Image (cartoon, helix red, strand yellow):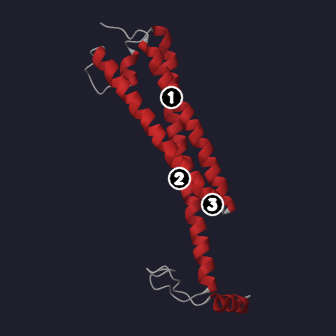
Amino acid sequence: MRILDSNWESLAEMLRREIEGYGRLFHLLEEQREHLLRNDLSDLIETNCRMEAHTDELDRLRKERESLVSNLCRTLEILEGPPTVKALLSRSPEDTHALFEELLREVNRLIGESRKKLERNQMLLHRSRDIGQTFLNMLSPEPANGGLYARSGRSRRKAPGALVGQYQARA
């Protein structure tokens, strides 16, 4: 039976890089949340662009790890089941088992936490949109006939002066 020799270090480093990437994603998700709470649209858009680039980087890291694991499994002739880090554990040095188990646990935990933070931010975004729509309906309760803007980009609503007058009349 062939044993995973020094390659275990490159696999551990790959998992550490993924964990670091999820840490950066957490930071970006917190920035996004702050921008949503402050209704800071320009910073929100900029943060969303950075998040998109960063998730592409995380996807690249995941594919790189999967490729390494697949190659190691093929090299070690591990043919039963899909190529996974857990499948490589039986062929790694005994003193590395706890390290790999903890790295895997942390990656999986971070994936779950990232999903929760993203869902919370999406909920905030939906609530913000609903509040904005409610406010616009207060300003002009007429049906929008398909939205606020026509295909030409012009507003379907009355002139701003009429909106202000309606709002002041209600206040």
How far apart are the alpha carbons under marks 3 and 1? 36 Å
Circle 3 SS class: helix
- Residue at x 60% of width, y 90% of height: 159
The residue wearing badge 3 is 42
123 to the left or right of 87: right
Question: 10 Å neighbourhood of mark 1: few (<14), some, or many (≥20)?
Answer: few
Q: Position of residue 129 (x, y in %)?
A: 57, 68
- Which one is nearer the viewer's eye here, 140 or 46? 46
Q: Amino acid at mark 1?
A: Arg
Q: Amino acid at mark 3?
A: Ser
Badge nearest the viewer, 2 or 3: 3
35 to the left or right of 10: right
Residue reaching furthest to the front: 152
- Which one is nearer the viewer's eye here, 42 or 67? 42
The N terminus - image quarter: top left
Q: Position of residue 171 (x, y in %)?
A: 74, 87
- Residue at x 41% of width, y 28% of height: 65
- Which one is nearer the viewer's eye here, 105 or 150? 150
The residue wearing badge 1 is 105
**Does 10 appear above or below 155?**
above
How far apart are the alpha carbons under marks 1 and 2? 21 Å
Q: Which mark is residue 119?
A: 2
Q: Position of residue 87 (x, y in %)?
A: 35, 21
